[in-house]
Structure formats: C-alpha cells, structure tokens
Image (cartoon, rainbow, N blue to C red):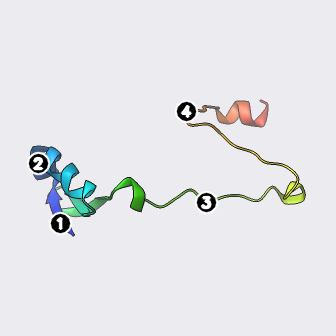
Amino acid sequence: MTTLSVGEFKAQFSDILEEVRRGGVVGVRYGRAKKPVAVLVSAEHAPGRATRKLGLLEGKAKFRVKAGFKMTDAELLGS
C-alpha cells in the first residue's frame, strides 16, 4: 500500500486514481503527526452495504432506499 500526505495526494491525484483503478491501495496521512485518516480502494473492492432484516416481514416484503434520498430525524420520527 502506498501512503501519502494530503499535499502529495493532491499533487498526484490523477496518477493515484490510475493506480487505484489497476487494483492498488493508497493511504492518506494528515496533519503534523501524519496520522492515517483514509484509504482509497477501487469501487469493486469497497465494502458493500449490509442488508437488514425486516423482522416479521422477512421473506414477505422488500424495502429499498434510492441513492440521494434525504429525510431529517424530525421527519423520520413524525415530529
């Protein structure tokens, strides 16, 4: 895994995307202490979303939320 500071990451962004596209993994360090804050991997290697069971409706119903769906906590709770 290649690890870069934020400045190096910004300066080499196009090259980094090409490396990730080929299956590479790139880490990003931030701040004076150079602490690791992120890891960039290709979309096919990114962790998937976990599915949730519908309790009593399991096997009887399906539920899907489309990308970009927005709802405030108040709307969800009916406040």
**What residue appears at the point 27 percent right and 54 percent down from the top-left corner?**
21
**Residue 56 in view, yes or no:** yes
The part of the image, by quadrant, that contains residue 78 is: top right
Residue 66 horizontal side relative to residue 62, left or right? left
| Sequence order check, earlier mark of 3 and 4 | 3
The part of the image, by quadrant, that contains residue 51 is: bottom right
Which label belongs to residue 68?
4
Kindly state the secondary structure of the residue where label 3 is placed: loop
Kindly state the secondary structure of the residue where label 4 is placed: loop
Residue 72: x and y, percent? 64, 32
Residue 61: x and y, percent? 84, 49
Kindly state the secondary structure of the residue where label 1 is placed: strand
Name the amino acid type tagged 1: Thr
> How much space separates mark 4 and mark 1, taking CA atoms?
32 Å
Q: Are marks 4 and 2 in contact (CB under 8 Å)?
A: no
The part of the image, by quadrant, that contains residue 45 is: bottom left
| Sequence order check, earlier mark of 1 and 2 | 1
Vertical position of residue 18 compared to residue 75: above or below: below
Name the amino acid type tagged 2: Gln
Name the amino acid type tagged 3: Ala
Residue 54 horizontal side relative to residue 42, left or right? right
| Sequence order check, earlier mark of 1 and 3 | 1
> How much space separates mark 3 and mark 4, taking CA atoms?
18 Å
Crowd band around label 1 with a 10 angstrom C-alpha radius: few (<14), some (14–19), many (20+):
few
> How much space separates mark 4 and mark 2, taking CA atoms?
30 Å
Crowd band around label 2 with a 10 angstrom C-alpha radius: few (<14), some (14–19), many (20+):
few
| Sequence order check, earlier mark of 3 and 2 | 2
Residue 15: x and y, percent? 13, 50
Q: Which residue is mark 2?
A: 12
Q: Which residue is mark 1?
A: 2
Residue 76 horizontal side relative to residue 32, left or right? right
